[in-house]
Image (tube, rainbow, N blue to C red):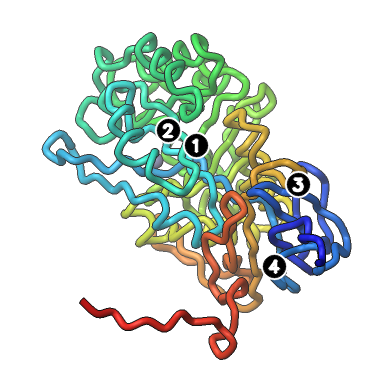
Amino acid sequence: MAAQPPYDVLLKGGHVIDPKNNINKVMDVAVTGGKVAQVATNIASSDAKKTIDVTGLYVTPGLIDIHVHLYMRTDPKTLARPDGSVQPDAFSFRTGVTTMVDAGTSGWRTFPDFRERIISHARTRVLALLNIVGSGMGTGKEDDPAEMDAEAAASAAKANPDIIVGFKSAHYNGPGWASVENAVKAGNLTGLPVMVDFGYITQERNIRTLLLDKLRAGDIYTHCYSGHREELLEDGQVNPAMVAGRKRGIIFDLGHGAGSFYWYVAVPAFQQGFYPDSISTDLHSGSMNTGMKDMTNTMSKILDLGSSLDQVIRMSTWNPAKEIKRPELGNLDAGAEADIAVLRVDRGRFGFVDSAGAKNYGNQLIVCELTMRKGQVAWDLNGRASQDWKSFPYQKKAWTH
Ligand SMILES: [Zn+2]
């Protein structure tokens, strides 16, 4: 009797891009027991129970989207504006995303409900940046400093270290710096990063003070190409505060969303060499049905702006993994959980729409062909892992009472 092959699945013939391990060439990826077993050239098909031919495609770590909205509430009466949250598995795998980070939709008071009803039932790995506002986003409390309890947020994070990866300050339009300062305080109490959606600026509450005085190295400025907070100056120059912030270790995240990515900001920023550290969608029902669409469309925009595919994959895998301090994610190390994306890059003439509805043309479009989560196929656009129906061992069975 022949010995059992050592591997469960072999992804054969693809071009592997694994920025953490400096891999950017044709290699095979073997998976067993839900983990990456080996990445090497020419692993024999006879060594695997199942081989999936991915010739002509790119094989990358599962994508990590660190700015999405997933906390659908049960009581819409508590909301000041429509809840645009989406169901994680409905939008993750079809674009190669295996890890989603909810960016502050829930706060320290509402997180237990989010965890119980949504996170624990998702096949997608869902992590969370906890809103410094107790009730979370869109509840009409985002300008109320009394709702911003750093100690309560820190204890929620300490009670849920498997899920909570940091804190979120968002949309603030109240007095002073209460939102940012309390989020940073919670960050200091836990050693976790803070993501800031800078909300509304004033003379005193400006981006220079935020990036040079208020935030710490490793904190994340999302919506970096929004233009709403003087990221780009009137003369078309990237605000020197952004460049100085980057020098002291502030992270710049894309956070496309429905109102935070404009060609008139992104194109000059790219020309001046100011690139995002991480690509994220700010996925919600508003953004996905307008210019943003999804993770691979957003990545395509950055690819067409001039970043290399290797850089775009780095911005969607290893960089976000480091930003949320989860270095076990976003790579294809032997022993890593087998979260894998298989991508195709189409050539042609494609239109990419920004948050104002304006179009820019590009000639490369990234499409997700196949996604694996914990070694299982979770999305397969062209049935690459499937068997031809003519030879398929159907179990024919009438459905009778
Ligand atoms: Zn958002």
Instruction: Check disc 1 and give the amino acid type.
Output: Thr
| Number of numbered discs visible in the structure rendering | 4
Separation of marks 1 and 2 at Cα, in angstroms:
6 Å
Q: Nearer the viewer, mark 1 or mark 4?
A: 4
Residue position marked by numbered label 3 in the rendering = 19
Q: Tell me the residue at 54%/52% (across/down).
A: 97
Disc marking residue 197: 2
Q: In this picture, is 9 found above or below 268?
A: below
218 and 64: which is toward the camera:
64
Is label 4 or label 2 in front? 4
Residue 157 visible to the viewer? yes
Q: Dot 3: what SS?
A: helix
Residue ranking furthest to the bottom: 390
| Residue 142 visible from this viewpoint | no
The residue tagged 4 is 50
Label 3 and label 1: CA atoms lie apart by 22 Å
The amino acid at mark 4 is: Lys
Q: Pointers 3 and 1 in contact (CB under 8 A)?
A: no
Residue 165 appears at what percent x and percent y?
51, 27
Q: Is the shortest distance between ligand 1 and the CB of mark 4 under 8 Å?
A: no
- Label placed on residue 222: 1
Percent x, y for residue 118?
Answer: 34, 41
In the displayed structure, does residue 353 sit left or right of residue 47?
Answer: left
Whichever of callouts 4 and 2 sits on the residue coming sooner in the sequence is 4
**Residue shown at the point (32%, 83%) measured from the top left:** 398
Picture layout, residue 274 above or below residue 53: above
Between the residue at mark 4 and the residue at mark 2, the CA separation in whole angstroms equals 45 Å
Residue furthest toward the right? 41
